[in-house]
Amino acid sequence: MDLGEALMNNPAMTNPAMTKEALKALSPDALDALERKIAGKYMHRIPWGAVAWAFSNLMVWLSLWPLVLFDYLPIWAAFPIAVLNVALSYLPSHEAQHSIIAREGHPLRWLNELVGHVSVIPFAQPYRVLKNTHMEHHAHSNNPELDPDYAVHAKDDWDFLKNSILRRQPAGPAQKAYGDTMARIGKSHMLIDALLFNLVFIGVLFTMAWTGHAIEAALLWWLPKHIAQTYIQYYLSWAPHHPGNRQERYGQTRGFKSKVGNLLSMGMQYHIVHHLYPRIPLSSTPAAFHDLKPILEIRGCDVGGWAETT
Amino acid sequence: MRTRSRCADTEYSSKKGLIKGQKSSYNLDQRFIFTNPYFGCTMQIFNFVKVLFSPIVFGLGFIGPLSAEIIAALAVPLTIGTPLHWGLLIGGLLGLMAQVRGSWIWVKPS
């Protein structure tokens, strides 16, 4: 029995009233061991839900095109579905970026990579660029020079929205941060993926527009992509990292209680757990967060509105 | 390490990942072409990509026909020209503004 396991079997660690006092009495090594042991309970699970989500979401979005073009579904009904599809397309790829579905060498590694690549097709973003820049975000969270997502920081919700719109203007820095990051880590050759994705995206929009289907293209892909991009940036980058002034392991991100609930905030209320243990699947982060909360509070994490909960 | 592109008078610093004097948001494609030996460092490719992804082309290629379809769908009475003429005028002007100012919404990114 290792140290972490021994501590988990100690009644003082499972009694909520005793937990914090008991935890404070532990040595740093014992606290580390206990934290890793608790987190370990939630790792090494294949998130089949995310796999099904990736393919079903893509299928629904792809099916909207013939349904609308052949008049089986009105465009006003397809538009909100398309927005939802594009907004939901990133997270399965995010699971793949962290090799949560299958690590290198695992027999299902091909599935991990397939999910990573295909789930972000509606988002018109390349998996390899997203993955590499996201790893840099984890390695240098909130670092103004090295975090490719640093520019998302803003003083409040409205400032975020204003920045989000301005940053993607032609002279804005939206693409620059990712391009610079890929060059810095020596993987600028992977930007060919971004070039191809952009070519396909623009090619589809132009072809649809000049064959009399501009409104359909705008409401099935162009506008949903912009709305989803803002939504994803808000909940995945801005909200869990605000105010973004701490760079240490337990201060990079925060817990928060979303007014729109866990599903609509894309599970990001528990983003602390993801940054500490990126191999925990998204669906397990709420349970892992609540299990780890006393330790996180002792570590100085900002657990936000969850501080008063047991 | 500092390399000099053979196809353009542009210095590229691989350490900092920056191209001197670069202001455009199209640097993503520019950097790829300048640094990828497999696809050749040619100004023709770079110029093609730069033009294809430019706001003026997007304005004429997509915003124009989109505006025309919206004008037609709303049955806006036109005394001169067709919805496509007006759509291309709107898309072209918006694209020109985005090209010159670097913003589709007039307000420039800081």
Image: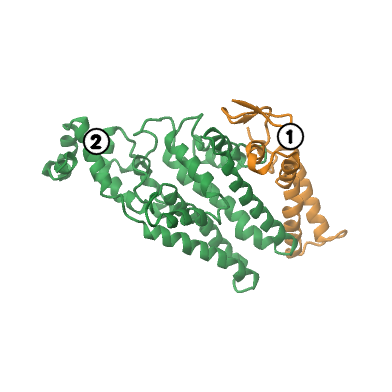
Chain colours: A green, B orange
Question: Residue at 66% of width from left, 43% of height from top?
Answer: B39
Left or right: A7 as drawn, with respect to A123? left
Mark 1 crowdedness (10 Å alpha carbons): few <14, some 14-19, many ≥20:
few
Question: Residue at 50% of width from left, 29% of height from top?
Answer: A144
Mark 2 crowdedness (10 Å alpha carbons): few <14, some 14-19, many ≥20:
some
Left or right: A248 as drawn, with respect to B30? left
Q: Nearer the viewer, mark 2 or mark 1?
A: 1
Residue A1 lies, in percent from the top left, at 14, 43
Residue on which the image places disc 2: A32
Along the line of sight, the residue nearer the viewer: A131 or A7: A131
| Amino acid residing under circle 2 | Asp
Q: Chain of mark 1?
A: B
Q: Chain of mark 2?
A: A
Q: Residue furthest left?
A: A11
Secondary structure of residue under mark 1: loop
| Amino acid residing under circle 1 | Cys
Residue on which the image places disc 1: B7
Asked whether the viewer can see residue A77, the reply is no
Question: Residue at 57% of width from left, 43% of height from top?
Answer: A190
Along the line of sight, the residue nearer the viewer: A7 or B72: A7
Residue A188 lies, in percent from the top left, at 58, 39
Q: Residue furthest top?
A: B1
Secondary structure of residue under mark 2: helix
- Measured Cα–Cα span from mark 2 to mark 1: 55 Å
Residue A160 lies, in percent from the top left, at 53, 40
Residue A250 placement: quadrant: top left
